[in-house]
Amino acid sequence: MKLYYSPGACSLSPHIVLQETGLAFEAIKAPTKTHQLDDGTDYYTINPLGYVPYLVLDDGRTLHEGPAIVQYLADQVPAKNLAPANGSWERYKLQEWLNVIGTELHKGFSPLFNPAMPEEAKVLAKERLMTRLKWVDTQLAGKQYLMGDNFCVADAYLFVVSNWIKPTGMDISDLANLGAFRARVAARPAVVAAMKAECLI
């Protein structure tokens, strides 16, 4: 299968999950700024929406959205315990986390990366984001990961989105649980491998 990604973007989440699964894949850089692959191909000819991540299976089927992609990948290797079983209460809690991260955090950062966004709007966006991050910090109290002691696909997504805190000028030094979580995830071999592959470390 092929994963189209842009270095450091939200596509790093399924890139990490692919490393965790041990499944064979090809990672193809599709920078969000140029929408051009290294060989000169216009990325829009591959994915008309132009964004990442984009997963293409060997049989030609495709998935666009990160939360859907990571669940699909996790379900290919159930023994890895990257997602609870479909239909279980825990699976719905995982989906809840993926939605919170996607709508409250991921999209919350969007204005901060938009050069056309007025500074006043960015201040408001940061304030709203900080309330969400503080809540996430409380949810991590006494836990290794979002769902308890086992790493899951939502942890990869939270790690990637929280990587954007520093470049947007936010300070989470007082969020000890989130800070410890970030350090824990950053040390995972699959995370190191994905970040090295994207030249982020």
Image (tube, helix red, strand yellow):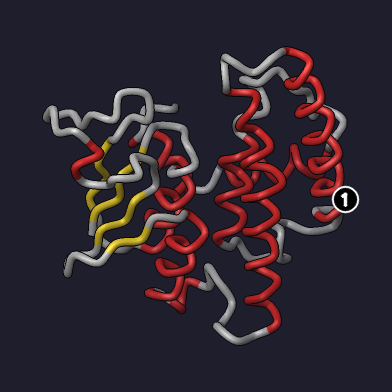
Vertical position of residue 39 compared to residue 47: above or below: above
Q: Is 181 in front, or is 58?
A: 58
Q: Quadrant of the C terminus?
A: top left
Q: Nearer the viewer, residue 166 or 113?
A: 113
Asked if 36 appears above or below 16 in the picture, the reply is: above
Rendered location of residue 83, percent (x, y): 55, 71
Q: Residue furthest bottom?
A: 87
Quarter containing the N terminus: bottom left
On the image, which quarter does residue 162 sit in? top right
SS for callout 1:
helix
Q: Viewed as shown, does residue 148 lie left or right of 20?
A: right
Q: In x, y percent, where is residue 199? A: 37, 27
Residue at screen point 30% across, 24% down: 34
Kindly identify the residue that appears in the image at 70 percent across and 17 percent down. 169
Quadrant of the rendered image containing residue 134: top right
Instruction: Kindly identify the residue that appears in the image at 70 percent across and 14 percent down.
Output: 118
Could you say where residue 66 lies in the image, as x and y percent from the top left? 47, 54
Name the residue carrying label 1.
Answer: 138
* Image-based side of 145 in relation to 31, left or right: right
Would you say 91 lies left or right of 12 here? right
> Callout 1: few (<14), some (14-19), or many (20+) C-alpha neighbours within 10 Å?
few
Q: Please state the total of marks drawn on the protein image.
A: 1
Q: Is residue 45 above or below residue 83?
A: above
The residue positioned 66% from the left and 21% from the top of the image is 168
Along the line of sight, the residue nearer the viewer: 181 or 171 = 171
Depth check, front residue: 177 or 158: 158
Horizontal relation, residue 150 to residue 141: left or right = left
Residue 163 locus on image (x, y percent): 60, 33
The image quadrant of residue 97 is: bottom right
Amino acid type, callout 1: Thr
